[in-house]
Amino acid sequence: MPMETVLVVDDERVIRDGCQRFLTKEGYHVLTATNGQEALDILGHEPVNVILCDLKMPIMGALEVLDEVTVHYPHVPLIIITGHGTVANAVECMKKGAYDFVTKPFRPDHLILVVQRALEKQALEQRTRQLQEERARNLYDLAMEQSRIRTIVNCMADGVLVTNRELEVVLYNPALMGLLERSTPEHQPAPLGAFLSDEPLMAGLRSMLTEEESEGGFRSQELRHGRLHLRALSAPIRGPEGQVVGTVTVFHDI
């Protein structure tokens, strides 16, 4: 497992060396910088997990570093190192996005605790982003799959009609509308009655959705629709756990 990297930014050598010593002892990889500009240069070519940054430095203090980090490295928590006289300024930095602050002189165990909490927060946010990205990919894959299914159904020469458990029509193709000589329903999903008036077929679909019929397979029926004589081949649609979630019927002009 790779070590987490902590970047310590302070113009006081004693602070840099002290932080590096006890953070290294805790197993962290430590980088140091003497001012904010040097820190930004390091961030440009080194992966960093947490930044410890002194509030006041001769060349670019924590406030300016925070502005850059917020824009270019928004997932890297920044912890302010401050003196007692500048606590109010450190709090102001937190309002602008800094994770936390520690006051000089600080105890090593306290600083380590703050760094650990920052890393835990970073890990949690990263996991949240991963889950969101995974969900977005799943939704995209689902949308693509639905699009492919719809394209295939629309290209079929036979009429196709798909219902949900409430016997509402959720998918149909142009061939079906041509066979039934129907116009597209105004509201969707539409009730099955907006497409068909054949009671035996409707009763067969209803029974297919009941628990006692759920073990059944295909069902073939013939029906008259105006001048047409149609064969309807119906089957239950099953969900991931095998439960019946709807029906599909293919209509063929015989």
Image (tube, rainbow, N blue to C red):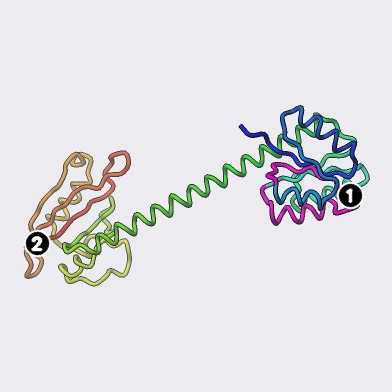
Residue range highlighted in magenta:
46-75
Q: Vertically, is 185 above or below 214? A: below
Residue hosting label 2: 230
Q: Residue at x 34, y 56 (%)?
A: 146
Residue at figure coordinates x 15%, y 68% from the top left? 179
> Which residue does the image show at 10% across and 66% down from the upper left?
225
Q: Residues within 10 Å of mark 2 (few under 14, many from 20)?
A: some
Residue 56's tag is 1
Q: Nearer the viewer, residue 18 or 215?
A: 18
Q: Nearer the viewer, residue 208 or 7?
A: 7
Q: Earlier in the sequence, mark 2 or mark 1?
A: 1
Give the left or right position of residue 214, taking residue 51 as reference: left
- Please give left or right for residue 152 compared with residue 100 in the image: left
Q: Position of residue 111 (x, y in %)?
A: 80, 34
Question: Which amino acid, by three-letter code, is at mark 2?
Answer: Leu
Q: CA distance from mark 2 to mark 1?
A: 84 Å
Q: Quadrant of the C terminus?
A: bottom left
Query: Is 210 a magenta residue?
Result: no
Badge 1 local density, few (<14 within 10 Å), some, or many (20+)?
many
- Compared with residue 118, is residue 177 higher up or lower down, i.e. above or below? below
Residue type, numbered disc 1: Lys
Residue 189 image position (x, y, % from top left): 31, 61
